[in-house]
Amino acid sequence: MQMNHKHRVTLHALFAHPVSANIDPKAVYSVIEELGGEVSHGGHGQIVVKLNKHTHGFHDSRHAFSKDEVAAIRKFLETAGIDPVRDYPLDTHAAT
């Protein structure tokens, strides 16, 4: 699956060590949608994310995610089978 560079950078930022606390929620939701997932408002300040038959609710944040929120998103993506190094390497020149 192809993914644009901006989305690859966001995906890799979610899996970076140490955990980043400066990731824009809109960028993360765009990545999840590009991965084939669905992002919807669940009410009560929740965003519901569905990807590869996995569902998780996240707090609807208007600001950058906290480290705990990034860790929760990372765990959700891992559970859904997403491995950015394997599936979406940043060095796209090697694939061309």
Image: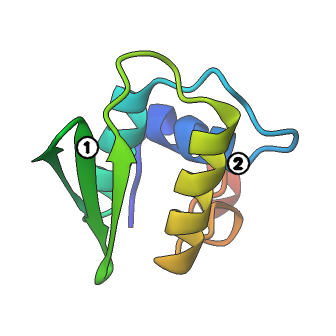
Of pointers 2 and 1, the one earlier in the residue sequence? 1
Q: Where's residue 39, x and y in %?
A: 20, 51
**Front residue of 19 and 31:** 19
Mark 1 Cα-neighbour bin, 10 Å: few <14, some 14–19, many ≥20? some
Q: Mark 2 points at which residue?
A: 91
**Placement of 41 over or under 22, stated as above or below:** below
Identify which amino acid the numbered label 1 is placed on: Gln
Identify which amino acid the numbered label 2 is placed on: Asp
What is the C-alpha distance between the residues marked 2 and 1?
34 Å
Q: Where's residue 52, x and y in %?
A: 32, 80
Q: Residue at x 66, y 50 (%)?
A: 71
Q: In which quarter of the image is residue 83?
A: bottom right
SS category of the residue bearing label 1? strand
SS category of the residue bearing label 2? loop
Q: Residue at x 46, y 23 (%)?
A: 24
**Placement of 94 over or under 6, stated as above or below:** below
- Image depth: mark 2 or mark 1 in front: 1
Q: Which residue is drawn at 69% across and 35% down?
A: 67
65 left or right of 93 in image? left
**Front residue of 82 and 71:** 71
Q: Where's residue 61, x and y in %?
A: 37, 26
Q: Name the residue under label 1.
A: 46
63 left or right of 82 in image? left
